[in-house]
Image: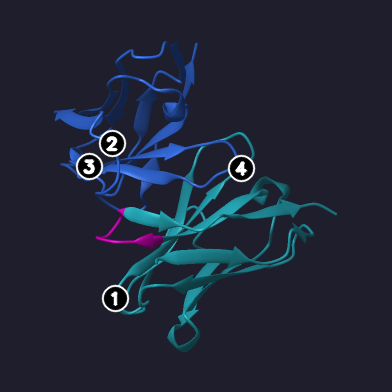
Chain colours: A blue, B cyan
Amino acid sequence: DIQMTQSPSSMSASLGDTVTINCLASQDIGNYLSWYQQKPGKSPKLMIYGATNLEDGVPSRFSGSRSGSDYSLTINSLGYDDEGIYHCHQYYEYPNTFGAGTKLELK
Amino acid sequence: QVQLKESGPGLVKPSETLSLTCTVSGFSLTSYHVSWVRQPPGKGLEWMGVIWGDGSTAYNSALKSRLSISRDTSKSQVFLKMSSLKTEDTATYYCARDADPGVMDAWGQGASVTVSS
């Protein structure tokens, strides 16, 4: 199975900051990478798919990028509504696999 | 609008079989895939399996021997059955519309399942 190593596991940032969350794939997955945001007690919400494509309705403050097998989610102008857990997800092959998640808190 | 809703028992005994139903609206099961994903308390997400628009299925090999996904298109329902439950199967179980494929663009609210005697 493809391993997705996500970092950091948790982070704290201030209002207005820019933060980056990373995922490293254990093998080539092309652009078959998505990012989900999950708030406490809620189901995950698709934010980015195809490594760089913004899902409809997601603020443009969110962006995704890729460098080789390294994938990043960047959030600009951090707001309180951005708190939650972010999961990366590879869908290059079955079984799909997820990163362990990054918990983002605002100071 | 697109909606998915999981339903099933909240408590199941070890060694028994879990049966969950995902009832969808706003899209056709013959046009979209539906995946099942679970999340143990305080832990990450685990992809369980998918039923494609043509009715074929794919499963996580770690669960394959215990897992079955099926559907009734006339009722817009997808079913998950998992046998020989263990306490480690305690989790919130989600169904999700799987758009293209693997891009899960709509999720149900989740069904919390506890495996305990």
Q: Secondary structure at mark 4?
A: loop
Which label was assigned to residue B68? none
Which label was assigned to residue A54? 3
**C-beta proximity under 8 Å, tags 4 and 2:** no
User: How many neighbours does mark 3 have within 10 angstroms: few (below 14), some (14-19), or many (20 or more)?
Assistant: many
Give the mark nearer the N terminus: 1 vs 4. 1
Asked if B100 appears above or below A95 in the picture, the reply is below
Q: Is residue B63 on the magenta stretch?
A: no
Q: Which residues are magenta?
A: B97-103
Q: What amino acid is labelled 2 in the image?
A: Pro
Pointer 1 chain: B
Question: Distance between the Cα atoms at labels 2 and 1?
Answer: 28 Å
Quadrant of the drawing holding the N terminus of chain A: top left
Q: Is residue A39 visible?
A: yes
List the residue tagged with mark 4: B40
Q: Secondary structure at mark 3?
A: strand
Q: What amino acid is labelled 4 in the image?
A: Pro
Q: Find the residue positioned furthest to the right.
A: B117
List the residue tagged with mark 1: B31
Residue at 44% x, 73% y is B25
List the residue tagged with mark 2: A59
Q: What amino acid is labelled 3 in the image?
A: Leu
Which of labels 2 and 1 is toward the front? 2
Q: Are the residues flagged by discs 1 and 3 from a single subunit?
A: no
Asked if A17 appears above or below A65 in the picture, the reply is above
